[in-house]
Image: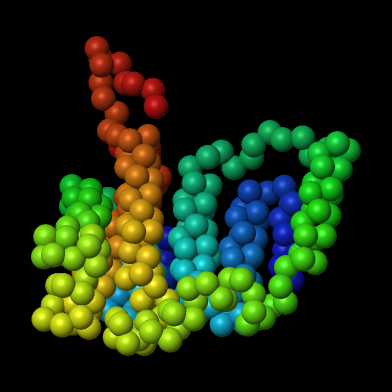
Amino acid sequence: MKNNFIVREVANLFIPIIVLFGFYVQFHGDFGPGGGFQAGVIVAVGIILYALVHGLQKTRQLILEVYIRFLMAFGLLLFAATGLASLILGGEFLNYSVLGSDQLTGQHIGIILIELGVGITVAAVMVAIFFAFVGRDAK
Amino acid sequence: MLAATAVALLCVRGLFVASMLTGIYSLLSTALFVLLDAVDVAFTEAAVGAGITTVLFLAMLSKIPSRSERSQAFNFQPLPFLVVLLTGGILVYATQDMPEFGDPKAPANLHVAPKYIIESEKETGLPNMVTAVLASYRGYDTLGEVTVIFTAGVGVLLLLGRKRRRVLGESVEE
């Protein structure tokens, strides 16, 4: 698909919109449908579309695999760390009410943090799986 | 239409057609979820089932030989068919005992659901109840899910993502 002008241009137009929509779903998940999981998948789709159109090699140069592996673990650790933070601050594990000055603020901070963790892990894992499958005999 | 797609999926032999049909199946179930007002589930199904899975299937298809040797004859086996028919019959029979769809007196709607519906906005400040339940009340479960996804990613990377190492001048077979 690399040489198809129309596909390439349309994809270039859409990739920023897809990723932006992913972030919208991520941070608006508290109010509308969506959340970390869906947002992670959407962002990953944007990156995969880029890889399909511009080739795997170029994508690998842009997004180093070390970072992807790091982010896979980072998202999960962010989730667990939020839980631990609430534990240390005097609540139960994953009880976010103690994170903020009052219950609602605390819940909000906690939920945004763990959704971010979910989103980061899901996006990184999806991209990692795609790279692993597609890049098998490219080496 | 879901059933028709499922039957078609069983009958086709080509892998490309089959993966396209799974995508269509996912899209149809998305429509079903929207009809049932489960927007969050529909969102996930559309993104994962219809989107990522199909792309991964197609990526795999481009890596394997296009024509695998398979017997074209429709291989009918009576015993598995009977077992499937029996299990399906029992499941349909069991649905007779299930509460009516949307019944407010159903056990599932009496346990913690009213508490979530009434108090989740007050306790968490989130208008979206699904997010409130997933992220706050059921935080443990979500943490477990993320761990599962992480483990799956690590597994795939261990199996496929490794660079071929040269041992004694010989490339290791994967």
| Left or right side of B61 for A3 | left
Q: Nearer the viewer, residue B33 or B127?
A: B127
Q: Quadrant of the N terminus of chain B?
A: bottom right
**Vertical placement of residue A13 versus A82, above or below:** below
Q: Nearer the viewer, residue B162 or A139?
A: B162
Q: Quadrant of residue A139?
A: top left
Q: Nearer the viewer, residue A41 or A132?
A: A41
| Left or right side of A104 for B51 | right
Q: Position of residue B2 (x, y in %)?
A: 71, 67
Q: Position of residue A52 (x, y in %)?
A: 38, 59
Q: Is residue B42 visible?
A: no
**Vertical placement of residue B145 versus B64, above or below:** below
- Here the colouring is rainbow
- Residue drawn 25% across and 16% down? B167
Q: Quadrant of the C terminus of chain B?
A: top left
- Residue drawn 29% across and 28% down? B164
- Residue drawn 52% across and 58% down? B54
Q: Quadrant of residue A86?
A: bottom left
- Residue drawn 72% across and 77% down? B100
Judged from this view, the residue extending furthest toward the top is B168
Q: Is residue B141 visible?
A: yes
Q: Nearer the viewer, residue A9 or B42?
A: B42
| Left or right side of A51 for B7 | right
Q: Position of residue B93 (x, y in %)?
A: 82, 60
**Vertical placement of residue A85 versus B87, above or below:** below
For the image, the number of numbered tags is: 0
Q: Quadrant of residue B134?
A: bottom left
